[in-house]
Image: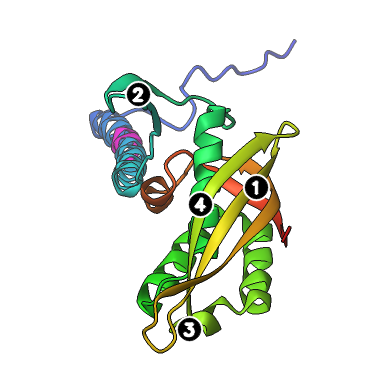
Amino acid sequence: MKYKNVDFAPDGGPETPYQKARQEWDEVIGSARVQARNWRMIGFCTIGVLCLSIMGNIYLATKSAVIPYIVEVSEDTGEVVSMGKVSGEKFSPKEASVKSTIAMFIGKIRSVSTDQIVVRQNFLSAYDFVTKKGRNILTNYTQESKIFERIGKKAVSVDKQVITKITENSYQCEWTEKHFNVEGGGGRKSTQHAFTGIFTIICELPKTEKKLLVNPLGIYIDEFNISRKY
């Protein structure tokens, strides 16, 4: 009967103290390398988050935020009656504010001064109170009415404005104009005429500092039509 020889020696030959020390050293070095790689990854992630945070802070610092406030002033005393921050994209100003804006707009585009600089400034200011659609209408109106050709010949003042609300966003205004013949230095009142107009308004919160300064209530004229009564 034959017996199979059994080899009880460990695989790979006998383990010497040198091999054991080398194995432990390799394990230490390997573990250190893994830890170093992990710390590098953590460092890169931290730098990335820090850069994003800095960029966000710079963006917020350079971005100007416009916070509009509505201030109600007493018509009798001029004192502030109430004040509050406007919230939301849409708001409804008081009817008196809308009528005041329309009256101011009419005065700017219908009044004619003997000083061409004043007339020009009035029209440039009127553009701050119209929408894009109203801007085109105002430009065409300026060309058709030939108001700038009256400078030095006639002076026009706007009087007795009566404004009535006819729909939610439309108002009818009636007013009279006094025309003075100033050509040649006479200064004599020549004629008086009556006009009527329909004005459609849109209310939008001012979103830039420039718009907040020139039109703080955000009342814009979207359409208007003016006709002479007599």
Q: Amino acid at mark 4?
A: Asp
- In this rendering, is residue 92 above or below 152? above
Please give the name of the residue rendered at 58% of the width and 28% of the height, measured from the top-left corner. Answer: 92
**Magenta-drawn stretch, dominant element (helix, strand or loop):** helix
Q: Amino acid at mark 1?
A: Glu
- In this rendering, is residue 7 above or below 96? above
- Of the numbered discs in the image, which one, if any, rests on residue 74? 2
Alpha carbons under labels 4 and 2: distance apart: 23 Å
Please give the name of the residue rendered at 33% of the width and 25% of the height, measured from the top-left corner. Answer: 76
Q: Are marks 3 and 2 in contact (CB under 8 Å)?
A: no
Sort mark 3 into few (<14), some (14-19) or many (20+) by Cα contacts within 10 Å: some
- Quarter holding the C terminus is bottom right
Image quarter for residue 195?
bottom right
Image quarter for residue 31?
top left
In this figure, which residue is indicated by the disc labeled 3?
Answer: 153
In this figure, which residue is indicated by the disc labeled 4?
Answer: 159
In this figure, which residue is indicated by the disc labeled 1?
Answer: 174
> Which of disc 2 and disc 4 is earlier in sequence?
2
Residue 93 seen anywhere in this rendered image of the structure: no
Q: Which residues are magenta?
A: 34-39
Does the magenta portion include 38?
yes
Q: Nearer the viewer, mark 2 or mark 1?
A: 1
Question: At which x and y percent is residue 198?
Answer: 72, 49
Q: Nearer the viewer, mark 4 or mark 2?
A: 4
